[in-house]
Image: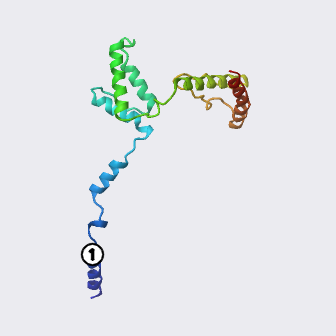
Amino acid sequence: MRKIVFLLIFLVACSNNKDQGVATLTDINTRAQETEVITEEDYPLVLTECLNTKGYDLQTPFDIQDLKSMLQQMNRNEEGKEKGREEGGEIMEDVESCIQENELWPDRESVNPEEQAKKFDESLELAQCLRDKGLNIPDPTQDDPKLNLSEAGEDREIIKEYLEECEPERTASRTDK
């Protein structure tokens, strides 16, 4: 008897709910589509997928560096030499098109070339200062203007100390210009 009473109470409680509180798969799917944001880690995957829809046959890259090397290989002919402007330009146009279509790297156009050159020069000065202090730091490149301090071979505290010592030199050289 008690079981029947509990069952009836349960059925009444459940049947009074209208469709308002019931979650459906369509609700979940539309919310997921609305909030789907592409992270910067996924940019190479999205770009590769887009290029493959344009007729290229690219494997899924591990990261952006892997994608860059794949694109460079595509830009070479069988002898290993760079393709001509027309062939290489077509690949780069497709890359640009995919970047714009998927709104990848939105901040890349906002980088001022003069500001970028200034940061590169500052990184070169810092690398030289750190080398003068005895650290084995390679010069940054245009592609990667950040200094790689992980291979300096020194304790973090020593590197921080050297960075602080080099900072006034960088500040002074900026005001002299």
Residue sitting at 37 percent across and 22 percent down?
92
Does 11 sit above or below residue 152? below
Q: Quadrant of the C terminus?
A: top right
Nearer to me, 163 or 60: 163
Q: Position of residue 169 (x, y in %)?
A: 72, 26
Q: Name the residue carrying label 1.
A: 16
Q: Quadrant of the N terminus?
A: bottom left
Vertical relation: 125 (above or below) 103: above
- The colour scheme of the drawn protein is rainbow
Q: Which residue is at 37% across, 18% downward?
A: 75
Mark 1 residue element: loop
Q: Position of residue 129 (x, y in %)?
A: 70, 24
Left or right, 172 with reference to 80 = right
* Image position, residue 101 (x, y; %): 34, 33
Q: Is residue 106 left or right of residue 78?
A: right
Q: Can the viewer see residue 59 in this picture?
A: no
In the displayed structure image, the side of residue 24 where residue 99 appears, left or right: right
Q: What amino acid type should be assigned to the residue bearing mark 1? A: Asn
Q: Residue at x 70, y 23 (%)?
A: 173
Q: Quadrant of residue 83?
A: top left
Label 1 crowd bin: few (<14), some (14–19), many (20+), radius 10 Å: few
Residue 108 or 42: which is nearer the viewer? 108
Q: Residue 11 at x, y = what percent?
A: 26, 77
Residue 165 visible in the shown view? yes
Please tell me which residue is depicted at 39% across the width and 23% down the height of the picture.
Answer: 71
For residue 10, above or below residue 144 = below
Question: How many callouts does the rendering have?
Answer: 1
